[in-house]
Amino acid sequence: MPAADPTQRFSSRVGNYVRYRPGYPYAVIDLLRKECGLTSSTVIADAASGTGIFTRMVLENGNRVFGVEPNDEMRNAGEEFLSAYKLFSSVKGTAEATTLLDRSVDMVAAAQAAHWFDRERSRREFIRICKPGGWTVLLWNERRTESTSFLREYEQLLLSYGTDYQSVRHERTTHEIETFFAPSPFQVRTFDYRQEFDYPALEGRLLSSSYTPQSDDVAYRPMLSELRRIFEAHQLSGRVAFEYDTLVYYGQLG
């Protein structure tokens, strides 16, 4: 069964998460520069920073970044992953209680995480820690489910074997996002993104998801057998691809 506490859902999946989760298109950084005034001097809080996938992108832009992560295993992995970046600070905290000082950052970002937040409490916290005129940016990769026959079959696998897949799909975040920003205005942009896998990587990508059965579950072996069947039916030169819509919501909360 999935962990009741959302902050603990990925504790046993960190290794696969680090290796097989997708990044984000660099067009996101260009967007933030153009629309949100991102410069190398912008101080950023990355809420629920996880293993540091998005955190690294803004560190590479030269930003000072506070990676706020409640899960010990994920935070430790992020600290190791980002150990070479002197402008990175790891913080044990949640989106609802970051522990950061009032008005201490210029931007709050949350990548692949907003669907786990208590929206009202995290919204208040983002307003508290952000300087006047600061920006909130919520982004995530939404896997396409109908664009190829492989993705249609992969989606059916998740519907068949996922423990609580339908209740945590990112589409739910998309539908509810206005309640996070409202009554403040916000903008949204969408970018294409793609991730290719051989079979071991595809299996790792599947097992990085918090809603898939783990090795002690009776459904684990049948799920992997079905994954192998789908892969063999659709692979080209030993590879298959996920296609994503990378959604970026941004606005100034008030």
Image: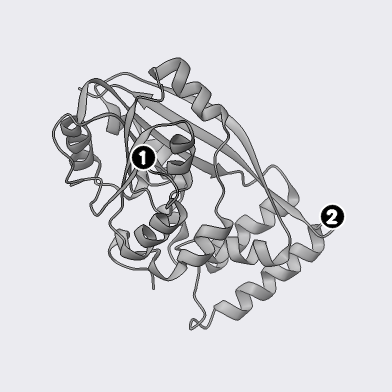
Give the image location of residue 47, x and y in percent. Answer: 31, 43
Left or right, 207 with respect to 92, comes to right
Q: Residue at x 35, y 24 (%)?
A: 41
Res 27 quadrant in image: top right
C-beta proximity under 8 Å, tags 1 and 2: no
Q: Quadrant of the C terminus?
A: top left
Residue 171 in view in this figure: no
Res 86 quadrant in image: top left
- Residue of label 1: 87
Q: SS at mark 1?
A: loop
Disc ID at residue 186 = none
Left or right, 102 with respect to 196, comes to left
* Above-or-below relation of 238 to 176: below
Q: Residue at x 43, y 16 (%)?
A: 35
- Residue of label 2: 236
The type of residue carrying mark 1 is Leu
Viewer-nearest residue: 164 or 188: 188
Crowd rating for badge 2 (residues with CA inside 10 Å; few <14, some 14–19, many 20+): few
Left or right, 183 with respect to 62, comes to left
Residue 42 in view in this figure: yes
Q: Residue at x 60, y 65 (%)?
A: 204
Q: Quadrant of the N terminus?
A: bottom left
Give the image location of residue 63, x and y in percent. Answer: 39, 32
Viewer-nearest residue: 33 or 158: 33
Give the image location of residue 13, x and y in percent. Answer: 46, 67
Q: Which mark is first along the chain, 2 or 1?
A: 1
* Above-or-below relation of 59 to 77: above
The type of residue carrying mark 2 is Leu
Q: SS at mark 2?
A: loop
| C-alpha distance separating marks 1 and 2 | 42 Å
Give the image location of residue 97, x and y in percent. Answer: 18, 47
